[in-house]
Image (spheres, helix red, strand yellow):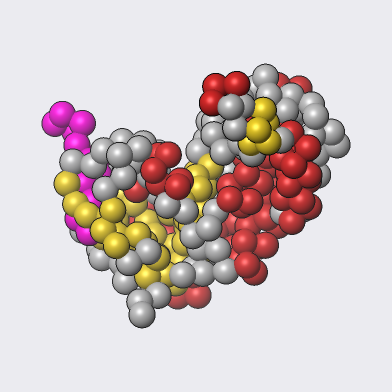
Amino acid sequence: MSDIILETRGLTKRYGGVHALTDANFVLRKGEHIAVVGDNGAGKSTFVRQITAVEQRSAGQVFFDGQEVNFTGPLEARESGIETVFQNLALADDLDVPSNLYLGREIIKFPLGPFSILDRKAMRERTLRALEATAVKIPNVDNTIRNMSGGQRQCVAIARAAAFASKLIIMDEPTAALGVQETAQVENIIRGLKDRGVPLILISHNLRQVFDLMDRIVVFRRGRIVASLHKDETDGNDIVSYITGVKGGSDASYA
């Protein structure tokens, strides 16, 4: 049985005459943590949006958990076991933490169609367990998201992904706007996911973080994959050379 959890073949995205992503061949194995790096506009987020069907790809194939998939939208990707933490977090500011964790997958106490009654107690208890499992510290989960710091908001989004991800987590710059202490908390969550064997794709500009936490590093430049390296086979200067185009002029397949 294959240990590949995600594979893309020739993944391509065009916006009119602009080629944002071209022939991206990528493989992620079960339990593996991969960093996706590159300059702004290199195609990193575009790549993730095609996998999760936030956008529909122009060409190419996506295989997930052994089957070719053609998700019609991010909800379908989530239902298949892919949880994503995007830069905009996708949190509801006016809801509390349990309501955000269970947004779209609420626990129903009495199913009465549009008048169904939610089991708020169960959602709150499970939220506390999810936060404990990911070592996320939120002083009061009954507070609305609007009243939380940027770091707390980010940790809620990551805890939601970690709690429900059955097969894969994707994080897009999860610590870009965080302080040192909050960044350390997010990195501890990532280490916990590694211990649990949950595969992860991390988009990051932070090379220290990449080398500390990831197994492999995939470099995007101008919409193409130009390098795929085990972290022990490279260093920061090498990665920067690929990002800037000093090395790796053509696309590469990752296996």
Residue 128's image quarter?
top right
| Side (left or right) of 19 relative to 140 | left
Which residues lie in the magenta part? 8-24
Q: Residue at x 40, y 46 (%)?
A: 77
Q: Quadrant of the C terminus?
A: bottom left
Residue 241 appears in view: no
The picture places residue 101, in percent across and down from the top left corner, at: 64, 38
Q: Residue at x 17, y 46 (%)?
A: 59
Looking at this view, is 91 or 203 the one in front?
Answer: 91
Q: Is residue 198 magenta?
A: no
| Side (left or right) of 17 relative to 94 | left
Extreme residue in the bottom direction: 1
Q: Residue at x 53, y 58 (%)?
A: 166
Looking at this view, is 155 or 220 the one in front?
Answer: 155
Q: Is residue 18 magenta?
A: yes
Looking at this view, is 136 or 222 the one in front?
Answer: 136
Q: Quadrant of the N terminus?
A: bottom left
Residue 208's image quarter?
bottom right
The picture places residue 63, in percent across and down from the top left corner, at: 29, 59
Q: Residue at x 35, y 59 (%)?
A: 64
Looking at this view, is 96 or 147 the one in front?
Answer: 96
Extreme residue in the left direction: 17
Q: Main secondary structure of the magenta part?
A: strand
- The vertical placement of 16 against 251, above or below, is above
The picture places residue 122, in percent across and down from the top left corner, at: 74, 42
| Side (left or right) of 41 relative to 182 | left
Residue 113 appears in view: yes
- The vertical placement of 134 against 106, above or below, is below
| Side (left or right) of 88 relative to 133 | left
The picture places residue 2, in percent across and down from the top left corner, at: 35, 76
